[in-house]
Image (cartoon, rainbow, N blue to C red):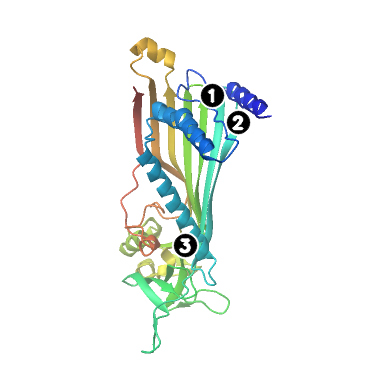
């Protein structure tokens, strides 16, 4: 039975063309499984793994397979397992402060001797809630909300941690509405009020989707990144509108809001933060690359065998957005840092750079 399995495995490898001149580092080894779990069996398996797997990995890929390196790898693996177990225990608490998931799926859509088309999907969802803040029962002190930061000015935007709400709730000035939800107009302008809940920085989910294609010696890759949900306040648009330089302020004669005529300058200089809140969702083409691997035969003829592998590639990153709701800025590159507070703002950032380049990779 074992022999038939090995024969079938080798037939599949030959059918896929894994062992070829174009793929010189690919190797296959078989390791015998000891019949008994005694000292002789363990010693035999150890010698087989080192001779047929570890030494081959070191020879083909330059991987350090020394005893110290293996002990370090085992230690890191055990530490990762410990962290995963602690996270699992943490999420089983009666009031876990964070739940969610992250998974990755990858596989081949098409795979023949010459053509491979693969795809990878990564998706993550983080659901959190502020369960408890500081309390000193003896002193009679109870904190039910904590300010993570704020933007001063007429917008009055605050980012807070509030018990029972997701981390990063955004509050600020908003439109005052009647019982039917209509914005109230008074003295020719919309009525605003403070301490209005404007949304949360937390997205519904984030992820990426990648495609990789190979045909003989040609390869191509594309990576798409996306985020769904989450809100941000555009300081960029707020400042531009207040100074009259935003595109939306161009209509100054005959300006109207919700069907009511009003003075454009008075409106834009008093507009509440709600007017400048945007959906932080996006879908972008993050990276594209195209490469060509030179054959071993070609390299042997040209370099006399000095160069073992050679690949030339061209690439581009941050190419363009399919979906973006922020006004002229990038929703994933608009913060001053990665903190919860900063992710609530489009803070007059520098434009994201679109990069192009080429590379040559040689192996000796």
Task: Say if residue 60 shows up in the picture.
Answer: yes
Q: Please name the residue that numbered disc 2 is placed on.
A: 110
Q: Nearer the viewer, mark 2 or mark 3?
A: 2
Q: Quadrant of residue 157?
A: bottom left
Image quadrant containing the N terminus: top right
Q: Which mark is residue 202?
A: 3
Q: Please name the residue that numbered disc 1 is placed on.
A: 18
- Label 2 vs 1, first from the N-terminus: 1
Asked if marks 3 and 1 touch (Cβ < 8 Å), the reply is no
From the top left corner, tell me how far across and down residue 285 is, in percent.
46, 42
Residue furthest to the right in view is: 1
Mark 3 lies on a secondary structure that is loop
Q: CA distance from mark 2 to mark 1?
A: 15 Å
The residue that appears at 42% across and 72% down in the rendered structure is 161
Q: Quadrant of residue 154?
A: bottom left
Looking at the picture, tell me which residue is in the foreground, 35 or 102.
35
């Amino acid at each position: 039975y074992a022999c038939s399995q090995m024969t079938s495995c080798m037939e599949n490898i030959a059918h896929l063309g894994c062992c070829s001149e174009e793929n010189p580092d690919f190797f296959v080894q078989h390791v015998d499984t000891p019949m008994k779990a005694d000292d002789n069996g363990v010693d035999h398996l150890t010698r087989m793994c080192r001779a047929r797997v570890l030494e081959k990995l070191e020879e083909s890929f330059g991987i350090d397979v020394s005893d110290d390196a293996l002990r370090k790898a085992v230690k890191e693996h055990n530490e990762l397992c410990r962290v995963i177990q602690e996270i699992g225990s943490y999420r089983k608490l009666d009031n876990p402060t964070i739940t969610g998931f992250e998974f990755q799926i990858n596989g081949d859509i098409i795979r023949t001797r010459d053509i491979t088309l693969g795809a990878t999907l990564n998706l993550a969802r983080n659901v959190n809630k502020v369960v408890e803040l500081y309390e000193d029962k003896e002193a009679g002190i109870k904190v039910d909300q904590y300010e993570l930061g704020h933007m001063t000015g007429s917008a009055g935007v605050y980012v807070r941690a509030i018990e029972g709400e997701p981390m990063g709730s955004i509050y600020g000035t908003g439109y005052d509405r009647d019982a039917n939800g209509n914005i109230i107009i008074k003295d020719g302008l919309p009525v605003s009020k403070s301490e209005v809940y404007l949304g949360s920085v937390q997205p519904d989910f984030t992820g990426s989707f990648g495609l990789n294609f190979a045909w003989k010696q040609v390869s191509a890759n594309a990576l798409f990144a996306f985020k769904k949900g989450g809100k941000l306040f555009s300081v960029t648009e707020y400042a531009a509108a207040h100074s009259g330089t935003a595109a939306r302020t161009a209509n100054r004669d005959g300006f109207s809001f919700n069907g009511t005529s009003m003075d454009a300058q008075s409106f834009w200089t008093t507009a509440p933060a709600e007017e400048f809140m945007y959906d932080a969702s996006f879908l972008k083409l993050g990276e594209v690359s195209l490469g060509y691997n030179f054959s071993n035969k070609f390299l042997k003829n040209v370099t006399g065998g000095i160069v073992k592998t050679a690949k030339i590639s061209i690439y581009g990153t941050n190419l363009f957005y399919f979906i973006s709701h922020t006004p002229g800025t990038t929703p994933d590159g608009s913060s001053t840092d990665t903190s919860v507070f900063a992710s609530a703002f489009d803070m007059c950032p520098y434009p994201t750079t679109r990069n192009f380049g080429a590379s040559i990779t040689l192996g000796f």
